[in-house]
Image (spheres, grey):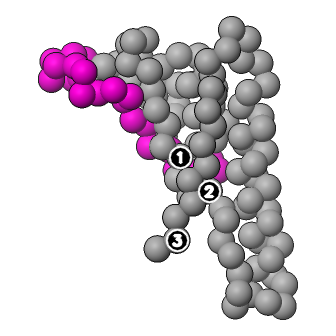
Amino acid sequence: ILLSIVDTPGFGSFLDNTGCIQPIIEYIDTQLSNYYHDEIGPNRRSLADNRIHCCLYFIEPMHRGLKKIDIEFMQAAQNRVNIIPLLAKADAYTNHELTEMKRQIIDDLARNNIK
């Protein structure tokens, strides 16, 4: 298995997060476009697959649910890449707290039509 990891340090951690989603979406779209362009070319056998197949999306546990930036990103990315929401620092919480946070996140996802 060839695995590449793309990190987005600091995503959504600024006072003004305007425009922080678009570069990530453009990167995902560019990788997909490059792959399909190469796939129709004559050298398909040596084709490198640099598409983004999965997004591990870490959710801040302090917020108790999804923040506006989380919802906006997931709505923009959900038709481009598989999103796996993960609760960051989950080991610092009790089972009851985790259950409540998970319920809140699931409710937020459903309420905002995020699949």
Q: In the image, which is nearer the foreground, mark 3 or mark 1? A: 3
Q: In the image, which is nearer the foreground, mark 2 or mark 3? A: 3
Height in image: 48 above or below 25?
below
| Image coordinates for residue 23, horizontal then vertical, percent | 78, 38
Say what amino acid the circle numbered 3 marks: Leu
Q: Residue 55 carries which label?
A: 1
Say if residue 75 shows up in the picture: no
Residue numbers of the magenta segment: 79-100
Cβ–Cβ below 8 Å for labels 3 and 1?
A: no
Separation (CA) of disc 3 from disc 1: 16 Å
Q: Residue 52 carries which label?
A: 2
Separation (CA) of disc 2 from disc 1: 8 Å
- In this rendered view, identify the residue nearer to me: 83 or 106: 83
The 10 Å Cα crowd at callout 1, few under 14, some 14 to 19, many 20 or more, is some
Q: Which mark is residue 71?
A: none
Say what amino acid the circle numbered 2 marks: Ile
Cβ–Cβ below 8 Å for labels 2 and 1?
A: yes
| Image coordinates for residue 53, horizontal then vertical, percent | 56, 58
Identify which residue is drawn at 57% across, 60% down. Answer: 4
Q: Earlier in the sequence, mark 2 or mark 3?
A: 3
Height in image: 68 above or below 114?
above
Residue indicated by mark 3: 2
| Image coordinates for residue 12, horizontal then vertical, percent | 63, 22
